[in-house]
Amino acid sequence: MAKQERGLRFQPSGGSRAPQVPTGKKQRLTIERLANDGRGIGFVDGRTWFVIGALAGEEVEARVLGAHGKVVEARTERVFSPSELRRAAPCVHAGRCGGCSVQHLPHNEQLALKQRMLAEQLSRVAGVEPQEWAEPLSGPEFGYRRRARVAVRWDQKAKTLEVGFRAVGSQDIVAIDECPVLVQPLQPIMSRLPQMLRRLAKPQALGHVELFAGSSLALLLRHMAPLSEADLTILKDFCALHEAQLWLHGEGEPQPVDPGLSLGYRLETWGLDLAYRPGDFIQVNAAVNEAMVAQALQWLAPRSEERVLDLFCGLGNFALPLAKSVREVVAVEGVQTMVDRAAANALSNNLHNTAFFQADLSQPLAGAEWIGEGFSAVLLDPPRDGAFEVVRKLSSLGARRLVYVSCNPATLARDTVELIKQGYRLKRAGILDMFPQTAHVEAMALFEASQDGLSD
């Protein structure tokens, strides 16, 4: 009897469990279709495989990066029957570096993939299609990235300093001597950076490096121990060679070695210069950012007598160009330091019809004094979480036109459902190709009050 009880006790309630797929295992499989993030999808033994670097219709050999339940994440190791769409990846680090996941797709196919992703989210989640699809907003597919974080790690066992970008699917660092998506002025800095860092006396105390290009070039070094005078001299000489500012980030906030220096970028169309500091959010693609601002203002069609609201305003990327064409801009941001930075940018550009406020925009808009008389139009550019609580009350502000700039089609679609409830209709939508060679999708949508009017 006891023996029988032991057998029952250890019998799995759901039957026998299939062994987990081990990391590193190689598997030959056929790719059925592409996922929304650009990975190929295949099926083997009841499991769904998501394969980086694979295209629909291809037969590939994939190496397992990780597995959980019925889902296996893998990367392409070998292609037996390539798709007609496949191109040779322009970057020698493709497939190992985790930065660019769809280089094997021609740029026009990348745009088509992103367009399908946006359309699918709007259709599936919100059950709508815009009255008009806008052409994709894009710029150069390479040499666009004006900001980058470079990983730095001391390998105690090998006694070497690793410098590069994180590998796909792991925390390993891929040594990078060139990166085709960086803007050209950062390329020489990137190529010579590893050699310079390895000359420093305490490489084990280094954190990471950030590179910036805009109104000036800059290099920021994160360090966990004080730097010696000799190390400072090496860093200063390196930055002087490349005509770049040197910023250090030890304890406290990042600071320039030469006090009074600042970073910035220019919005040429409007003659505006925006200052920022390391850690502030800026769009990494200058060309698409300027085109995005121009398109947002064109869609919003602000008039000179109007009062316009800019939510999630950041440094004033949209608010300052808006202020050039309307009576008043009220701009709201959740982080006080960014509010202060945006207000300073308005003053430095001699704009006095702007007002900046701090508010928690993850909460409903209720009783804020800055609402005042309401607004003719609203522009919002929320983070990936979207703006669900904000859009629930937008109709009460009286805005007839609304431009929503999104970095996540899923939350845009979710918020579209609420905006339709509020009495808006989706007039126009399109993708913004802010990150070529990746599957990341940014989008813009124009909403207008329906003929029946806004809900209460």
Image: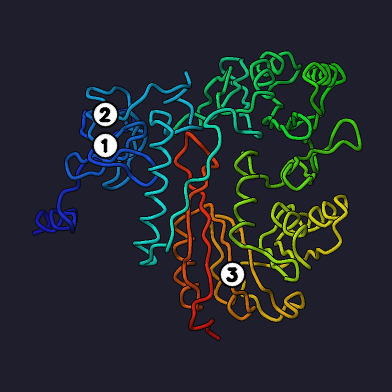
Which residue is nearer to you in this view: 80 or 299?
A: 299
Mark 3 and mark 1: span between their CA atoms? Answer: 40 Å
Query: Quick one: quadrant of the N terminus?
Result: bottom left
Residue under numbered circle 1: 56
* Total tally of numbered discs in the picture: 3
Q: Is residue 274 visible?
A: no
Which labelled disc corresponds to residue 401?
3
**Picture coordinates of residue 299, whole percent (x, y):** 58, 59
Please state which of residues 327 and 42 is positioned toward the viewer in this rendering.
Answer: 327
Percent x, y of residue 328: 78, 67
> Circle 2 sits on which residue?
83
What SS does tag 2 mark? loop
Crowding around mark 2 (Cα neighbors within 10 Å: few <14, some 14 to 19, many 20+) is some
Q: CA distance from mark 2 to mark 3?
A: 43 Å
The residue sitting at 44% across, 62% down in the picture is: 413
1 and 2 marks in contact (CB < 8 Å): yes
Give percent across and percent down for residue 418. Answer: 48, 73
- Quadrant in the rendering for residue 210: top right
In the rendered view, tell whether residue 420 sits above or below residue 247: below
Colour convention of the picture = rainbow
Q: Amino acid at mark 3?
A: Arg
x 43%, y 55%: residue: 133
Q: Say the numbered circle drawn on residue 6.
A: none
Residue at 43 percent of width and 33 percent of height: 107
